[in-house]
Image (cartoon, helix red, strand yellow):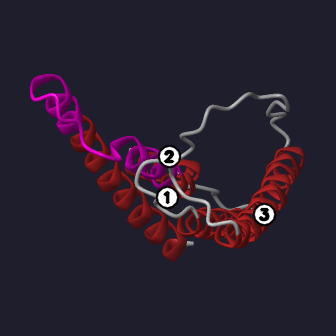
Amino acid sequence: MKTLDNVSGGLAILSGLVLVAAIGLTFADVVLRYVFAAPILGARDLLEMGMVTVVALALPFTWRIGGHIVVDLIPEYGIRALDRGRDISVRAIGFFVFAALAWRAWLRADDAALFNEATNMIALPFQPFFWLLAAATAFQALVLAAEIGLAATGRPLGYRAAWAAAETDGA
């Protein structure tokens, strides 16, 4: 799991760098547009594809640290077997959803190439971004599969659980 966590962290750092670049591009575009009446050609195209990259790369790390919005439809019962069953079920559903997303994104990449789909202003091709999305969702499915293994053996599932265990050991 440590390797998956390291890869997730690396992808999150890369995601953050792309986000910083998108912020810089937005700032430069606004200044050039309103001060010099010379906007950056294709800035919107780059921002749209940059945001696809940011979300795709940050997804596994955000999952691992428990950073997603959660609605507790199935409560914690305080009974280990029920809680473990809930954790495995939720991750199994997530695994199948992300595996299906990876598969569909891969197929969609082929369609994008076949139909020469690209952004409007600078004709940035969609295919590489679908490949990125396919790889990121496949990696997320791999993370979920590893967490299913952890849940089945009763070990802590994520960073948050590991941090909580470390805090109680140090206290």
> In front of the other: label 3 or label 1?
3
Residue occupying image coordinates x 36% and y 61%? 14
Near-viewer residue (125 or 164): 125
Picture coordinates of residue 91 (x, y %)?
A: 78, 55
Q: Earlier in the sequence, mark 2 or mark 1?
A: 1
Q: Amino acid at mark 3?
A: Arg
Marks 2 and 1 sit apart, C-alpha to C-alpha, by 25 Å
Marks 3 and 2 sit apart, C-alpha to C-alpha, by 37 Å
Q: Name the residue carrying label 3.
A: 104
Quadrant of the drawing holding the N terminus? bottom right
Question: Callout 1: few (<14), some (14-19), or many (20+) C-alpha neighbours within 10 Å?
Answer: many
Q: Amino acid at mark 1?
A: Leu
Near-viewer residue (45 or 143): 45
Asked if the magenta segment contains residue 52, the reply would be yes
As helix, strand or loop, the secondary structure at mark 3 comes to: helix
Give the magenta part as a residue range. 27-55
Left or right of residue 123: residue 110 = right
Vertical side of 47 occupied by 102: above or below: below
The quadrant holding residue 71 is top right
Q: Amino acid at mark 2?
A: Ala
Question: Callout 2: few (<14), some (14-19), or many (20+) C-alpha neighbours within 10 Å?
Answer: few
Marks 3 and 1 sit apart, C-alpha to C-alpha, by 18 Å
Picture coordinates of residue 136 (x, y %)?
A: 59, 64
Q: Name the residue carrying label 2.
A: 164
